Image: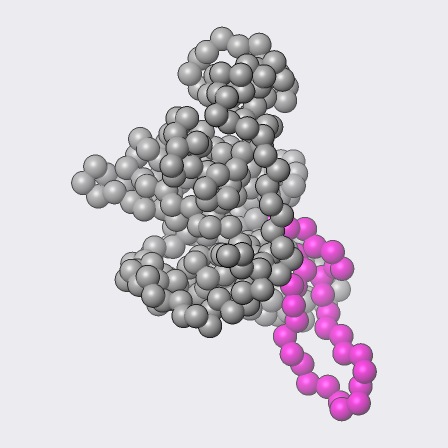
Amino acid sequence: MSYEDFYGPNNCLTIFYGLTITNIQTLAYELAEKNNISHNFNTTKKIAGKDWVKGFRKHHLEITLRSPGATSSARAQAFNRPNTGLTTVKSKCSNILALKGRRQVGSLTSVERGLLSTILVCKSAGGHFIPPMIIFPRVRMKTELQDSAPPGTIFHYHPSGWMQLDIFTEWFQHFLNHAKPTAEDHVLLILDGHMTHTRNVYFIDLARNNYTTVVYLPPYCSHKFQPLDVSFMGPLNTYYVQAIEKFLRNNPGRVVTQFQVSKIFGETYIKAVTPATAINGFKKCGIVPLDPNIFEDTDFIATQTTDIF
């Protein structure tokens, strides 16, 4: 991790992942800890203090604090990043047959508000999938939560159910164990710009030391550039909804809880994970085979109202 990573010609700012004061404070703490540098930073919040920030800015007068331009609602709606996760409630319902003229048609769900479990999936342009990771919204893990998950799945927990810096670093080690990059056979890993990827000192160093080149996708473009969004998440979500509906029909009076997530996800994952799905996702995004002209003028019509010349 170097100064050039953030302020060089190919830095975080130029790809719209600029760092806030808090981000810099956190990174300073992590670097000090990693390199065994003596410091008096806040070990509870794990950040550098305000005095350090003043000293940093004083020694780097070429850096200034700027207010970023807000992303318009039109652009945000056109280029959005859907959350990748599964809930204990159906995100949508399958269409059902009903009598004409009936104004209200319902479908049984587990509960009105579900708990989100984050699922981390990775696939290759050659049609292979890395066994997934499931993060449960809990304060401790129970072995029963792992029942009937896809083979090789790894598990973690966090009260929020969201990805965290240390959890993503653990997943990356899991990735290395399966991808097995070497000096003769490097690996290219394509990620979105989530802060656990772009502001993770340990992950970046681990990638550099293990022959892995990391490329970050531009923000709000995953529905066009992210192979998983393009060809995998849609079918997976459809199968997941169908599996929940099947569970509720076959188990009257029961609800889907965290303890059924692994089993239901396992059933749907096997259906969605096919070599053709992986290969077509990279092809549709113009990544493999490389096709710089994969997108036509019509693909950009929706954002023309926000273009600035």
Q: Relative to the observer, which residue lies in front, 302 or 114?
A: 302
Question: Residue, x 45% and y 35% (percent of image)?
Answer: 169
Residue 231, position as x, y percentages in the image: 44, 65
Q: Which residues are magenta?
A: 88-117
Residue 284, position as x, y percentages in the image: 38, 66
Residue 241: quadrant of the picture: bottom right
Q: Relative to the observer, which residue lies in front, 104 or 216?
A: 216
Majority secondary structure in the magenta region: loop
Residue farthest along the left direction in this orientation: 184
Residue 182, position as x, y percentages in the image: 23, 38
Q: Relative to the observer, which residue lies in front, 26 or 92?
A: 26
231 vs 146: above or below: below
Query: Quick check: is 108 in the magenta stretch?
Result: yes
287 vs 159: above or below: below
Q: Relative to the observer, which residue lies in front, 58 or 226?
A: 58
Query: Quick check: is 18 in the magenta stretch?
Result: no
Question: Residue, x 81% and y 82% (percent of image)?
Answer: 103
30 vs 210: above or below: above
Question: Can residue 146 be spotted in the picture?
Answer: no
Question: Residue, x 40% and y 67% (percent of image)?
Answer: 295
Residue 206: quadrant of the picture: top left
Q: Is residue 51 left or right of residue 284?
A: right
